[in-house]
């Protein structure tokens, strides 16, 4: 055993230094010190060879896995994994819908029409404002009664034509008196 290990063998700190030496991660002074120790210590040489074998094996496996993944199409497998099984798809297609779900537009359409018609009718049945100021009313002689309405200072003339109603029948009792 060399003084770098002690009597217990290679400790974890020294093993980390050996891996850093192998990977070229040590500064120059520490690298020279570990290099001189490896030349004299057989257990460290053996451990360094084992690290090399493990590293080579890992690189081979990593290259092999990468080439296998690159050669295999990925997306078909992803689609298959995400798709539900055939039995579940059929079960989803057979879900029953309540009558409200099936005919919700049929139920909503009358309500929508009622709102629009109500708005239109409300606007058309509001009473018109009464004319302000003096209004000239004239009766024009014609076969049918006609009234003319014109507000002073206005250029609007309203003509109202209505059919004469037959006179109510005269009762004979009323004549005799």
Image (cartoon, rainbow, N blue to C red):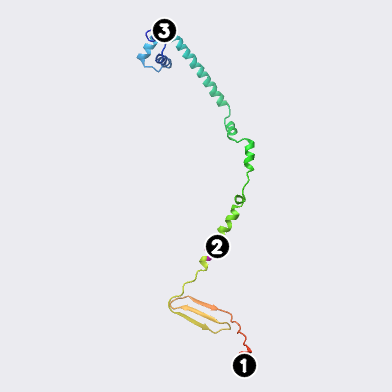
Q: Position of residue 17 (x, y in %)?
A: 40, 15
Q: Quadrant of residue 143?
A: bottom right
Viewer-nearest residue: 170 or 69? 170
**Helix, strand or loop for the magenta stretch, by majority:** helix
The extreme bottom residue here reads 177
Q: Position of residue 99 (x, y in %)?
A: 62, 51
Q: Position of residue 79 (x, y in %)?
A: 58, 34
> What residue is shown with label 2?
117
Mark 2 in CB contact with mark 1 (< 8 angstroms): no
**Residue at 63% in and 40% down:** 91
**Residue at 62% in and 35% down:** 85
Mark 1 in CB contact with mark 3 (< 8 angstroms): no
Give the magenta range. Answer: 115-121
Side of 175 relative to 9 (left or right) = right
> What residue is shown with label 3?
41
Q: Position of residue 146 (x, y in %)?
A: 54, 81
In magenta segment, residue 154 = no
Viewer-nearest residue: 141 or 176? 176
> What residue is shown with label 1?
176
Mark 2 in CB contact with mark 3 (< 8 angstroms): no
Classify mark 3: residues with Cα within 10 Å, few (<14), some (14-19) or many (20+).
some
Q: Is residue 80 above or below residue 36?
A: below
């Amino acid at each position: 055993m060399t003084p770098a290990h002690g009597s217990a063998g290679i400790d974890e700190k020294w093993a980390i230094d050996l891996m850093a030496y192998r990977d070229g991660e040590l500064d120059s002074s520490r690298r020279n010190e570990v290099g001189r120790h490896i030349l004299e210590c057989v257990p460290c040489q053996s451990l360094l060879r084992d690290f090399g074998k493990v590293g080579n094996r890992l690189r081979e496996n990593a290259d092999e896995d990468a080439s296998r993944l690159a050669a295999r199409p990925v997306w078909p497998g992803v689609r298959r994994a995400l798709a539900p099984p055939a039995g579940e798809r059929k079960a989803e297609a057979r879900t029953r819908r309540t009558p409200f779900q099936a005919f919700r537009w049929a139920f909503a359409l009358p309500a929508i029409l009622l709102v629009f018609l109500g708005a239109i009718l409300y606007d058309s049945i509001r009473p018109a404002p009464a004319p302000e100021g003096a209004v000239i009313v004239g009766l024009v002689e014609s076969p049918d009664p006609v009234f003319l309405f014109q507000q002073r200072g206005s250029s609007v003339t309203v003509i109202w034509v209505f059919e004469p109603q037959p006179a109510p029948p005269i009762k004979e009792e009323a004549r005799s008196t």
